[in-house]
Amino acid sequence: MEDLNQSSTGSLSRLRDIVARLRAPEGCPWDREQTHASLRSALVEECYEVIEAIDRGDDANLREELGDLLLNVLMQTQIAEERAAFTFDEVAEEVSEKLVRRHPHVFGDSQAKDTEAVLRQWEEIKKSEKPERSSGALGVVSTSVPALLRAQTVQKKAARVNFDWPDVGPVFEKMQEELAEVLEAIQSGDKSAIEAEVGDILFTAVNLARKLRVDAESTLNAATNRFIRRFEAVDRELGDRQMADTPLEDLDKIWNRIKHL
């Protein structure tokens, strides 16, 4: 049996050999049962765990989580290779060619002096590569990504073709307009109108974050973490008292004290 511990074998080659062994007839029953679809949820989970490690600035955990993410990629390519669809080498070659093709300012004679120019050039090249997938200026925006991130992506794409406010001022005005429309919808009692108007507020909030050069996804996540820390601090301060039995005025006083610590 081949020795998979040989140091002369490159790290990536060794990992590919281990995955192939796990998927082989004499390999692991669980690994052999996996499909592209069955690994989908794990892929999403691993991506979020990588993000969490980045947010914490935890290099050791980031290294581990990136390894788990790489393992999922290799499992996916191994399954594809077994059914003669494509190989890992073909995946690597395709993305290498794509990077060279979409960076002509690095690997060719094109000029792109700043990030905005690079992004506009990237989108133009992407559209020329797959014109059948281009649906106007926005192109294709995945429906599988989180809603906040999707809104941010759509707005950035619209801004690249100058469909954007010149500064943050009009965004504040739009937010006030949307808040007024929510109140109108509430007064009407129309649930579908309320949902639509609340959605418009969220979309406008993402626009506000973008204009202020703040990432909406990570900013909301940080705000949620702050709420959790403060909520748990209030709960600890109550001691034996039950939060549900404590008057809201008392809870609010504790909350405000903790908030300013």
Image (cartoon, grey):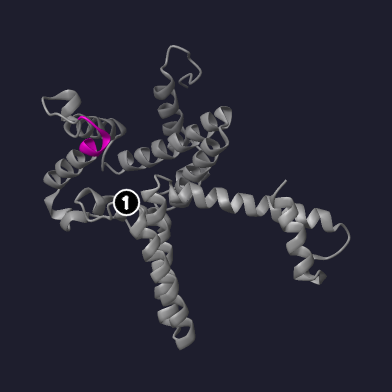
Task: Answer whether residue 116 is magenta in the image.
Answer: yes
Front-most of residues 116 and 256? 256
Q: Residue 53, position in %: x, y?
A: 55, 37
Residue 41 point in image, percent of width and height? 47, 52
> How many marks do you count on the picture?
1
User: Badge 1, how many Cα within 10 Å: few under 14, some, many 20+?
Assistant: few
In this rendering, the answer to whether 249 lies above or below 85 is: below
Relative image position of residue 241 (x, y in whole percent): 86, 63
Span of residues in magenta: 113-118
Overall secondary structure of the magenta stretch?
helix
Image check: 91 left or right of 42?
left
Relative placement, left or right, of 107 versus 50 is left
Residue drawn at x 30%, y 55% is 154
242 sits to left or right of 17: right
Residue 24 among magenta residues: no
- Furthest-bottom residue in this view: 188
Q: Is residue 160 above or below residue 248?
A: above
Choose between 60 and 154: the one closer to the eye. 154
Measured from the top left, where is residue 19 in percent x and y?
A: 44, 33
Is any atom of residue 153 visible in this view? yes
In the rendered image, the residue lying farthest to the top is: 8
Closer to the camera, 27 or 97? 97
* Residue that appears at 36% across and 65% down: 174
Give the residue pinned by disc 1.
167
Element type at marker 1? loop
Foreground pick, 82 / 106: 106
Residue 73 found in image quarter: top left
Q: Residue at x 77, y 58 (%)?
A: 254
Q: Quadrant of residue 242?
A: bottom right
Residue 145 at least partly seen: no
Q: Could you tell me the amino acid type at mark 1?
A: Asp
Asked if 1 appears above or below 167 in the picture, the reply is above
